[in-house]
């Protein structure tokens, strides 16, 4: 009798482990032809809360690492993605993206990881400062990570957009809880498998698949999240801003993903300010003289 192919069971990547949704629910994922491909975990509000707890435990260790070491780990992630380019291309083609466009998105994604790896030990020199003050004090400002950041990934460019939203936050030393692309979740599932074999500590990046309408309100109101970023439409933006106001968290969302041809625009400069969006500042006054 002919052998049946063993198909993959997609799972979410949370805390360095592969998990099913807390409720056990799934939703069907179809390929570009409309054929059934897999059942994807349909995460819930409880999954969001669990992921925030995991990210909080992992965040302190990640923030305590040197900026140079964080840069090394991000560069190692790019090294892990490069030899699996074909797999990522196939994940993007699942939603009907042509091969050439899928390859271009994967290449741009890897380059973007390398770009942020380079920023890891440099942004402090540009964003920190020694402040002249009219008093006998030495005054300086340094940056610090905020903590746990909530991210809403876009449906367009489900790999490039996903990492474009994640990278500024983790480069700054934060951990993240991510609601992945609703209509194209498979690239995030593939990315999770690559994160698991990278040097990035488990819990720094947590990827949840499912429906925005179920998870975005919880992301907005969760008191332990310090900021929210990503790419959202006007309806989700309103939900995030109203919910975030209750716990006074920062909301830094975009209307669209930065383009593939990043270096033709202001991408390299904008990346510094994207990192800045997920930093806090501490100013120290040190007495000088008598």
Image (cartoon, rainbow, N blue to C red):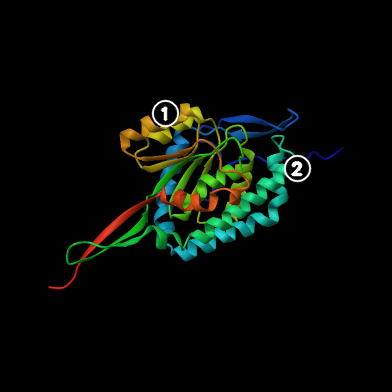
Question: Is 31 located above or below residue 6 in the figure?
Answer: above
Name the foreground residue: 77 vs 127.
Answer: 127
Horizontal side of residue 275 vs 27, given as left or right: left
Q: Residue at x 61, y 35 (%)?
A: 40
Q: Quadrant of residue 63?
A: bottom left
Whole-percent x and y of residue 22?
50, 35
Marks 2 and 1, how far apart at CA:
36 Å
Residue ranking furthest to the bottom: 289
Give the residue number, with chain letter if any, for mark 2.
Answer: 99
Residue 172, placed above or below residue 246:
below
Q: Nearer the viewer, residue 22 or 56?
A: 56
SS at badge 2: helix
Asked whether, in this view, residue 248 is left or right of residue 204, the answer is left
Residue 266: x and y in percent read 53, 49
Residue 238, labelled with which disc? 1
38 displayed left or right of 270 = right
Q: Is residue 86 left or right of residue 80?
A: right
Q: Position of residue 4 (x, y in %)?
A: 80, 38
What residue is rendered at 50% in x and 56% in y? 201
Image quadrant holding the N terminus, namely: top right
Q: Nearer the viewer, residue 126 or 57?
A: 126
Q: How many marks?
A: 2
The secondary structure type at the circle numbered 1 is: helix
């Amino acid at each position: 009798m002919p052998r049946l192919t063993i198909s993959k069971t997609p799972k979410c990547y949370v805390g360095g482990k592969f998990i099913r949704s807390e409720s056990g629910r799934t939703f069907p994922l179809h390929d570009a032809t409309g054929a059934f491909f897999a059942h994807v975990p349909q995460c819930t509000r409880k999954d969001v809360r669990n992921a925030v707890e995991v990210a909080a435990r992992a965040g302190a260790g990640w923030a305590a690492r040197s900026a140079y070491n964080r840069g090394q780990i991000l560069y190692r992630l790019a090294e892990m993605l490069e030899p699996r380019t074909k797999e990522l291309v196939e994940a993007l083609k699942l939603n009907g993206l042509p091969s050439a466009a899928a390859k271009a998105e994967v290449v741009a994604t890897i380059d973007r990881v390398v770009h942020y790896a380079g920023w890891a030990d440099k942004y402090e020199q540009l964003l920190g400062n020694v402040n002249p003050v009219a008093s006998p004090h030495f005054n300086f400002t340094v940056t610090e990570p905020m903590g746990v950041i909530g991210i809403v990934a876009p449906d367009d460019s489900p790999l490039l957009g996903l990492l474009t939203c994640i990278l500024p936050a983790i480069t700054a030393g934060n951990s993240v809880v991510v609601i992945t692309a609703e209509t194209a979740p498979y690239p995030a599932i593939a990315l999770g498998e690559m994160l698991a074999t990278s040097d990035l500590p488990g819990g720094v990046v947590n990827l949840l698949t499912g429906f925005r309408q179920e998870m975005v309100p919880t992301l907005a109101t969760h008191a332990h999240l310090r900021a929210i970023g990503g790419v959202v439409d006007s309806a989700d933006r309103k939900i995030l801003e109203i919910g975030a106001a209750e716990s006074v968290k920062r909301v830094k969302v975009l209307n669209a993903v930065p383009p593939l041809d990043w270096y033709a625009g202001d991408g390299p400069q904008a990346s510094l300010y994207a990192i800045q969006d997920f930093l806090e500042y501490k100013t120290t006054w040190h007495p000088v003289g008598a």
